[in-house]
Image (cartoon, helix red, strand yellow):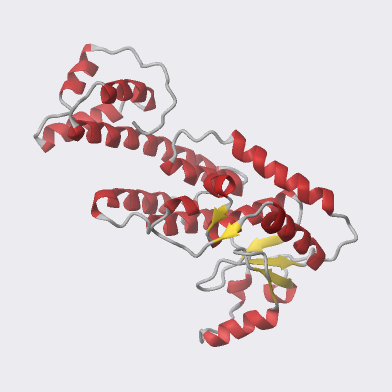
Amino acid sequence: MPGLIKQKPMQETRELNALFTLIDDPDEEVYSSVSDRIVNYGKGIIPNLENLWETTVSEEVQERIELLIHRLHFTDLTNDLKEWRDGAYHDLLVGALLVCKFQYPDLQTTPVLQEIEKIRRNVWLELNSFLTPLEQANVLSSIVYNYYHLKGVEVNYQNPDEFFIHKVVESKKGNAIANGILYQVLCELLDIPVRVINIPKQFILAFFHNDYDPVKHKNPQQKIHFYIDVLNGGIFTNNEVDSYFKRISVHPAASFFKPLSHKRIIQMLMEELAKCFESPSIAYKKDELLQLASLLDD
């Protein structure tokens, strides 16, 4: 059974026992009705389903039980994401950890938070108010990529773990989206004005001037010192970014340089993660992720 933390089963009633005996019903209509009734009990029924899974010899029934547990976790995650969306402040790290819980519903977040705090503290000890923006970025990148040994890899839709921030912290390896989120989280914790921007077909960060105001400054590019490649911590200049736009034959509109909201970053993370679940047997996960992403539409 997928590694679940043991919890106390709820009291089994006659109705619950009857529903459990019908999980293997070959009639899809009956099974659909039974599964809906079971899901209505809420996540408190998960320990009962785990026990049933362990005492079941039929692989087909085990698969049905796993799907029921997944549905219960998905309902719970949907509610948590709505709560995050409707909150006054959309904490980026909390949003990224919610996405992890899609695949790892029993994730314990404390070790992740402790590890990120350790990195933040190492960077903070090396920073001072006299450093230039470039020096600040070099300190952060040196600790993250050289001392902490974070590696960047090309997006690989065969490996969903490279999208999950807790796995990136654990394995020290992630794609541009996950690494970019981790880098921005660290910058926010350190009050460094680095943000993900909307450059087409790229996931890069921009180091903004301290006085950048999205309302006042209509051309954000004029308020960007330089850009950061989150795969290795390398620096891009404004000229290099302008050359990139010429190469892809796209006009560098001001909207491409505006910092993305936390909601949009998490939405992009889920949209890209959904591409990992294309095969027919797991396509339901793709649909669910796109459903979750749509909750964050502005």
Front in this rendered view, residue 6 or 133:
6
Front in this rendered view, residue 154 or 241:
154
Count of numbered circles on the image = 0
Residue ranking furthest to the left = 27
Who's the residue at 73% across and 76% down the image? 222
Q: Is residue 108 left or right of residue 215?
A: left
**Quarter of the picture holding the N terminus:** top left
Front in this rendered view, residue 86 or 234:
234
Residue 215 seen in the current view: no
Establish if 95 lies above or below 152.
Answer: above
Residue 8 seen in the current view: yes
Who's the residue at 46% across and 56% down the image? 297
x, y percentage for residue 284?
Answer: 29, 49
x, y percentage for residue 140?
Answer: 74, 57
Q: Is residue 193 left or right of residue 166?
A: right
Establish if 101 lies above or below 241.
Answer: above
x, y percentage for residue 70?
Answer: 34, 37
Q: Is residue 133 left or right of residue 265?
A: right
x, y percentage for residue 139?
Answer: 78, 59
Who's the residue at 11% across and 30% down the image? 25
Front in this rendered view, residue 110 or 73:
110
Who's the residue at 72% across and 69% down the image? 216
